[in-house]
Amino acid sequence: MFKKKEILVTAFALFSLFFGAGNLILPPLLGFNSGNQWLVVTIGFCLSAMAIPILGILAHAKLQGTLMDFGKKVSPSFSLIYAFFIYAIAIALPSPRTASVTHEMAVQPYWDISPWFTSSIYFGIVFVFAMNRSKILGILGKLLTPAIILILVFVIGITMFSFPFEFGPSTIASPFTNGILEGYQTFDAIGAVVVGGVIIISINLRHTDASYEDKKALIRSAGWLAGLALFLIYMGLILSGALSHTYFDADTTRTALLSGLAINSLGNVGNLFLSILVGVACFTTAVGIVTGTADFVRSRFNDSQLAYTITAIVGSVLGVLMGQFNVGYIIAVALPSLMFIYPITIILILLNVVPEKYASPLVFKTVTIATILFSVPDFLGSIRAIAPSADTFSWIPLQQYSLGWVLPALLLFIVTNIVTKAKSA
């Protein structure tokens, strides 16, 4: 069995894996708009932004593999296509978003500089780091997260005592499901399946003498501890946004609201410090995404350095092109792809977590296919190809909440298991 110190160290590593700039800017505005429904929104947000990602880590602990192993029971071809889409989305959306967040929080408030200039310099440096890997990023990551958490604790604590404990009416039609869908934008479930394997490999290398069950117990304990910390931070940020409903304009942006809360709590110096930390945290995330994607492409081309370099160049160019847009625009552009790939990711995580006897290859195939098919209406609705309440798909349960895939996937999971057991009896 592992000591409490080792559990805490692992929990901190997991927390650092998930906690990035997106996790900072999303909750406050969600709370701001949710008003007196802030707790309902918190539960929905944490379901997709905390619980599912932590289960993704537990799935990695069980598989002891890589991203390619998550879909292998469906088919090797599906697994490859799924991995390709995951990396394509990561390099085209969350990576450029880090430049946009950095510009809006750490550059725009202090200098009159074009976002084109910011994203060009930003991803020029990202490319240099991707081509010349350095331990500096790892060291910065270990220092950044504690510093950001400390500032957030002050922001949340002071906000709770600065503003009257009163809430306005909610402007969100479906707080719970809106919280779930907003949690998609953290990309944390995708992060769990992509980067989670790195954590598992690290644990295996550090504890070669530990048994498989002990390592699973370590990951399980650390995972839920990290999840609790994420839940408390998310709840605090959402509550802070909800309490500030009379202090900011109704059309305030995500970054403006977070900066405003920081200024109210810590003053201009505190906000400047937070902005710098967020900017550096964004940078480490971007380097990680570009490097990870380039590594994946290189592995598909016989460990070709040329493939790695070309992918790093493409990732950096995409970062410049997309990174010059504002955060709200990138979040809106990301929605269609997330409405399609996130349900598949959630299902693959859950199927890899449940006991083997309930997750046969046939179960993987039927449930995954159902999820793909019933995610299509949500995808079409997100690109306005169909109206969200279109009669064509109104017969699908939960379709009006953009969760039409949930019940069909659950039904196929139950039916396929019943049929499989009946045949083997």
Image (cartoon, grey):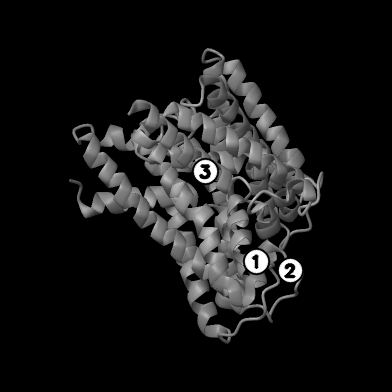
Mark 1 neighbour class, 10 Å CA radius: few under 14, some 14 to 19, many 20 or more: many
**Front residue of 304 and 67:** 67
Mark 3 neighbour class, 10 Å CA radius: few under 14, some 14 to 19, many 20 or more: few
Per the image, the residue denoted by label 1 is 29
Q: Of the two numbered discs 1 and 3 on the same chain, state the one appearing first in sequence.
A: 1
Q: CA distance from mark 1 to mark 3?
A: 35 Å
Q: Is residue 286 above or below residue 82?
A: below
Amino acid on which the number 2 mark rests in the picture:
Thr
Q: Is residue 87 above or below residue 57?
A: above
Amino acid on which the number 3 mark rests in the picture:
Leu
Per the image, the residue denoted by label 3 is 411
**Front residue of 56 and 273:** 56
Q: Is residue 268 above or below residue 90?
A: below
Q: Of the two numbered discs 2 and 3 on the same chain, state the one appearing first in sequence.
A: 2
What is the quadrant of the C terminus in the image? top left
Is 82 on the left or on the right of 195, as rendered? right
Determine contact: label 2, label 1, CB under 8 Å.
yes
Per the image, the residue denoted by label 2 is 252
Residue 137 drawn at (x, y percent): 48, 42
Q: Residue at x 28, y 41 (%)?
A: 216
In this rendering, the label closer to the viewer, 2 or 3: 3
